[in-house]
Amino acid sequence: MLLSAPAGIDDILPEQVARWRFVEDKARELFARYGYSEIRLPLFEDLRVFVHNVGETSDIVEKGMFTFDSGEDHYCLRPEGTAAAVRAYLQHNYPKTRPFQKWHYIGPMFRHERAQKGRKWQFHQLGVEALGASDPLLDAEIIALAGHLFDELGLSGYRTVLNTLGCGDCRDRYRRTLQEQLGPQRGRLCADCQRRMDRNIFRVLDCKQEACQAVSAGTSTLQEALCGNCRSHFEATLQGLRILEIPYEINPRLVRGLDYYTGPVFEFVHPGLGAQSALGAGGRYDNLIAENGGPALGGAGFALGLERILIALEALGQTQALAASPALHAFLVSIGPGTREPLFQLAGKLRRGGLRVDLDHEGRSVKAQMRSANRSAAPFVLVLGCDELAQGQITLKRMDTGQESKIPLDSVLSVLRPGAADLPG
Ligand code: HAM
């Protein structure tokens, strides 16, 4: 019986990897330009890292985690990176030693959701977290960085949508207002939202059901409940975006599915994505460090979905840049008895000398070896026959002109080395 990977888990095949590397390499380069160093966080953590921080009433924790036990201990595959980054920040004592940290991560995350295009059990995020400061210009920098990456990738047509969720006091005020306004309409809400009303009323605003959206459209927004500090932080963030000339829209009803946010939150949406329209999202989480036993230090970040970036690029027809993978420098062809081992030896020398070369391993005819050479797109083919071997020579064929010349076997490396001045033909 042939086994398959589970429906929500994709293989990333060799012919697809160049597309992934294209995005990852650009992201790494830009993260470094903005001062975000790489952190490599574990793929699984103590379950409490996420239950407590992402929120017990969030979709992720309620039904979206891959959990497992080992003896008395409960673990889960990481559904996101922020809570794990904060755990590492505190565990390694950064608040005392070097409180301001700018980190980035690239890697798989795991959520047990209904799998569909752009929504997977295992997916990949490009994320940044700026820990230890509450400067509104950091919020602006983080939003600008994501936009800069989309622009460098040629991913046009995305929109940057912002809101602010305020601090605990703002949200308490707003919670009371929502309870007053939604209470009489409870019967018109879906069963999930009726439950949310008691457990986390803000999530009613995030419901995708039309009836619930119609009800929540009539409620007042959190903007009206903002305190002076939260209002000025949001204003300063927007001013930072204007300074950097970043276009944005404000959606006063934008809420997030994770509980740790305070202050500005944002989403990047793209029309090429269909139902799962968010390329990425993030925001400020100024209570998270303190809630995990650390000092009162702020933090903000984003995570972008790599699969969704690739879907959007494909929808835009941006696939050429994505297909480029490094071609071989040369393909090696053997003709006749006794030539294969010397050719194999030559391949070893060339590879140690820094060249990308390959040769046949399927016992194919000379004609078939030439077809492989063509398909490899290598600019040179080296052909070794018995006569040439006897003379210590090899035939070098330039694939663009078809021109052939015989060169000494022991000069191949110096002739083909990238940048060599004496290329024949
Ligand atoms: P999130 O909104 O849960 O935020 O996820 C961020 C992005 O990850 C989404 O916008 C989407 O592109 C991608 N994504 C999420 N779930 C899936 C899935 N099942 N399949 C494919 N892609 C998915 C966070 O994770 C926060 N940690 C972001 C953050 C960082 N906030 C502050 N710092």
Image (cartoon, rainbow, N blue to C red):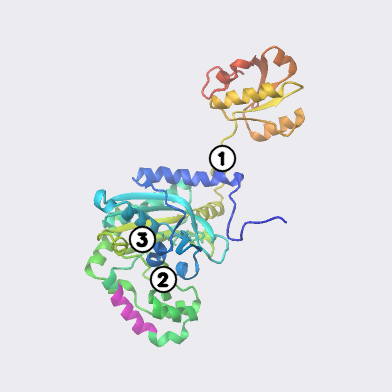
Seen at 44% across and 80% down, the residue is 195
Image coordinates of residue 85 in percent, x first then y, are 37, 55
Quadrant position of ligand 1 = bottom left
Q: Mark 2 or mark 3, which is nearer to you?
A: 2
Q: Nearer the viewer, residue 296 or 184?
A: 296
Residue identified by numbered label 1: 324
Mark 2 secondary-structure assignment: loop
Indicate which disc, 1 or 2, sits on the residue closer to the N terminus.
2
Residue identified by numbered label 3: 283
Q: Is residue 241 visible?
A: no
Ligand 1 within 8 Å of disc 2? The answer is no
156 vs 17, left or right, is left
Seen at 45% across and 81% down, the residue is 194
Boundaries of the magenta span: 171-182
Residue identified by numbered label 2: 56
Image coordinates of residue 358 in percent, x first then y, are 64, 30
Dominant SS of magenta comes to helix
